[in-house]
Amino acid sequence: MEDSIDRHIAHWSGELADLDPDVEGAITRMQTLVALLRRRREDALKARRLKGWEYDILWRLRSAGPPYQATPTWLAQALGTHPATLTSRLDRLQESGHLTRAHDPSDRRRLLVALTDQGHAAWEGAIGDQAAAEHELLAPLTGTERAHLAGLLRKVVTAAETDGPPLMPPVERP
């Protein structure tokens, strides 16, 4: 079975004598599959009338756990977004009904951002679309093959994280 990556490797093998076809094949396949999933995610968000940054804010609020709320300061830090940019984005999400902002009853100086039912539904729909795209991508593999692939990738990630920070930042709660 030959794919487009094999043709890519065949072309570059003639140009680069040191090209390792196994490394090039694995890395290029991972890169192109990630790009494919990114495009599918963007298409799914567009179909749900969500922008990537909107999904990211909803995801962060959802990751906060019940009651799915956080301060704007925590959100800005968690998202790596400038506070002024976040304020503008929160305005838009509040106008669209995805979240609310209210003063913290225990400290009126603090503002709390919370998901609405519409925000929960939007996030759940988007995450469901992503899960469907991921399952579709791996559908050609048996359950055993998927587990084997996950194990091999885990081994690579573990080695990459040995001398550096985690590749997947931890989900932090406010």
Image (cartoon, helix red, strand yellow):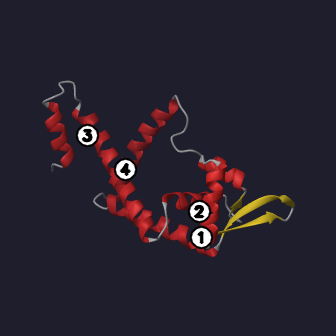
Q: What amino acid is at disc 4?
A: Val
Residue at left offset 31%, top offset 62%: 139
Name of the residue lying farthest toward the top:
18
3D distance between C-alphas at marks 3 and 2: 36 Å
Residue at left offset 18%, top offset 49%: 3
Question: What secondary structure is marked by label 1?
Answer: helix
Mark closer to the chain start, 2 or 4: 4
Q: Is residue 85 left or right of residue 3?
A: right
3D distance between C-alphas at marks 4 and 1: 26 Å
User: To which quarter of the image does residue 151 belong?
Assistant: top left
Comparing labels 4 and 1, the label whose residue is closer to the camera: 1
Label 3 belongs to which residue?
Answer: 25
Using the rendered image of the protein, determine whether residue 63 is visible from the camera's viewpoint: no
3D distance between C-alphas at marks 3 and 4: 14 Å
Q: What amino acid is at disc 1?
A: Gly
Label 1 belongs to which residue?
Answer: 119
91 or 132: nearer the viewer: 91
Comparing labels 3 and 1, the label whose residue is closer to the camera: 1
3D distance between C-alphas at marks 2 and 1: 7 Å
Label 4 belongs to which residue?
Answer: 34
Comparing labels 3 and 4, the label whose residue is closer to the camera: 4
Where residue 143 sits in the image (x, y, percent)?
36, 58
Number of numbered markers: 4
Label 4 neighbour load within 10 Å: few <14, some 14-19, many 20+: few
Comparing labels 3 and 2, the label whose residue is closer to the camera: 2
Q: Is residue 20 left or right of residue 138?
A: left
Question: What secondary structure is marked by label 4?
Answer: helix
Where residue 20 sits in the image (x, y, percent)?
23, 30
Mark closer to the chain start, 3 or 4: 3
Disc assigned to residue 58: 2
136 or 81: nearer the viewer: 81
Residue at left offset 29%, top offset 42%: 28
